[in-house]
Image (cartoon, helix red, strand yellow):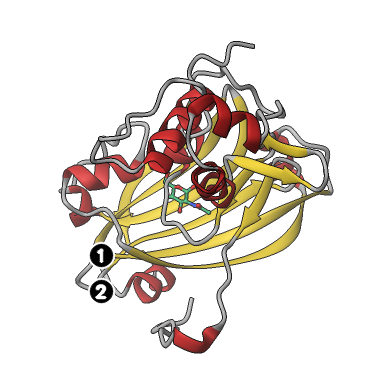
Amino acid sequence: MSHDTIFRALVTDADEPLYKQLQGNLREAVQSQALKPESLLPTERELSEKLEVSRVTVRKAVEGLVQEGLLTRKQGSGTYVASRIEKNFSKLSSFSEDMKARGRTPSSEWLLREKGSVTPDEALSLGLSPGTAVFRFHRIRMSDGEPMALEYSTIPASALNHSGKISSSLYATLDTYGNRPVRALQRLRAVPFEGEIAVLLGVPAGSPGLFIERRAYLRTGQTVEVTQSYYRGDAYDFVAELKTGADDVSQPESRL
Ligand code: 16G
């Protein structure tokens, strides 16, 4: 394994702090697969000696990437490139971004792409009046060609300027219309994957998985997405950073 990217010299008088530069190099090493899933990172000491930076800097860089889910710590044995997808649960990222950040290639198999009028249920959950046009996108989401999740999204047609032509990333397309969500509520629960869901994801019937519902909002408060996703339980770890509530007064404003 070549460690050229990891040990690339850091620039001490750059605007970007040293720990961020190191994070960039580590991220690049994972994305280019110079550091493959499950491979062991050089120790903190080795990194700090070779890069001529303090161990505090190295620790800060690594800690950030552990929190992002790119790296994972194993007690007593070191820091590794995460093999299961560790998904940061507090970040409003897209499937495509999550995969690219891990050096994997996202793709989708389309099951349904249709424009229709909101059903009474959708009208309620999207806060739209009856008759409003919506798109429904049903996709199998793949990572390096392997099915990882199923997603059933409903999007107000106006958020996509009434064009159902979305690129491989829904969020990237919403972004081009200035309608990428900025906030979301998510609920999840464990479910066994049965029937069609198990077949589409290529897992044995009864395999454990996660059912996740995301409702995402624009800055204006308008709902821009309701997506029901089925994420394979054997491929994902959901990670969230928790803080004591002392200085956190924010409360979810609406229920999912
Ligand atoms: C994620 C979201 C989903 C969103 C999709 C957009 C979860 C549980 N779900 O899978 O709500 O629609 O990303 O991905 O994170 P895209 O931009 O790659 O199409």
Write down the residue under mark 2. 221
Q: Residue at x 48, y 19 (%)?
A: 5
Q: Position of residue 40 (x, y in %)?
A: 71, 28
Q: Residue at x 74, y 59 (%)?
A: 191
For residue 127, above or below residue 43:
below
Q: Quadrant of the N terminus?
A: top right
Residue 109 visible in the shown view: no
Labels 1 & 2 near each other (Cβ < 8 A): yes
Q: Position of residue 52 (x, y in %)?
A: 48, 30
Tell whether 178 sits left or right of 224.
left
Q: Position of residue 85 (x, y in %)?
A: 63, 40
**Within the image, what quadrant is residue 39 found in?**
top right
Q: Secondary structure at mark 1?
A: loop
Q: CA distance from mark 1 to mark 2?
A: 5 Å
**Within the image, what quadrant is residue 239 found in?**
bottom right
Residue type (three-letter) at the residue carrying disc 1: Leu
Mark carried by residue 218: 1
Residue 60 visible in the shown view: yes
Local crowd size for mark 1, using a 10 Å CA cut-off: few (<14), some (14–19), many (≥20): some
Q: Residue at x 76, y 42 (%)?
A: 234
Q: Nearer the viewer, residue 100 or 139?
A: 100
Tell whether 37 sits left or right of 119.
right
Local crowd size for mark 2, using a 10 Å CA cut-off: few (<14), some (14–19), many (≥20): few
Q: Secondary structure at mark 2?
A: loop
Q: Nearer the viewer, residue 173 or 4?
A: 4
Q: Residue at x 49, y 50 (%)?
A: 152
Residue type (three-letter) at the residue carrying disc 2: Gly
Q: Nearer the viewer, residue 61 or 72?
A: 61
